[in-house]
Image (cartoon, rainbow, N blue to C red):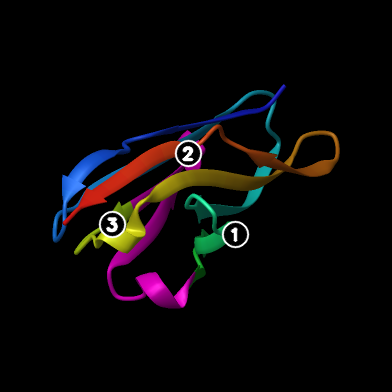
Amino acid sequence: QVQLVESGGGLVQAGGSLRLSCAASGNIFNIKAMSWYRQAPGKERELVAQITSGGSTNYGDSVKGRFTISRDNAKNTAYLQMNSLKPEDTAVYLCNAVIVVVTTANYWGQGTQVTVSS
């Protein structure tokens, strides 16, 4: 059984920084892409950032230049460094990973709340 566990969310003032972590555990053969999504109340879930197993990255337009995604393959962990946070970044941040166990499947974490006060 595969689990994704996010941590690092919290309350921060506008202009501040937070670092989120997403740790995958279980009978994992290989992790392909790892991604962060976010969902604010009344809004659709949106892609924040994605990183492939080779380290290629992709960012949502609203976070480019402020957020940085990285991963430690040895620890099966992805990170999201969030700088210059804005109130509109307030959302539940969810980790997603494409993981090869016996077959390849998408897995989601439970989410971590990020609240940015103005």
Q: Nearer the viewer, mark 3 or mark 2?
A: 3
Q: Are marks 1 and 2 in contact (CB under 8 Å)?
A: no
Q: In this figure, which residue is indicated by the disc labeled 3?
A: 82
3D distance between C-alphas at marks 1 and 2:
33 Å
Alpha-carbon neighbours of circle 3 within 10 Å: few (<14), some, or many (≥20)?
many
Number of marks in the rendered image: 3
Quarter of the image holding residue 54? bottom right
Query: What residue lies at 28% left-to-right and 57% top-to-bottom?
Result: 82
Tell me the kind of residue under disc 1. Answer: Glu
Q: Nearer the viewer, residue 81 or 9?
A: 9
Query: What residue lies at 24% left-to-right and 51% top-to-bottom?
Result: 116
In the rendered image, residue 70 lying in the magenta stretch gets the answer: yes
Q: Is residue 71 above or below residue 63?
A: above
In the rendered image, residue 18 lying in the magenta stretch gets the answer: no
Tell me the kind of residue under disc 3. Answer: Met
Q: In this figure, which residue is indicated by the disc labeled 2?
A: 74
Whether residue 54 is visible here, answered yes or no, is: no
Magenta region: which residues?
Answer: 59-80
Q: Is residue 1 above or below residue 28?
A: above
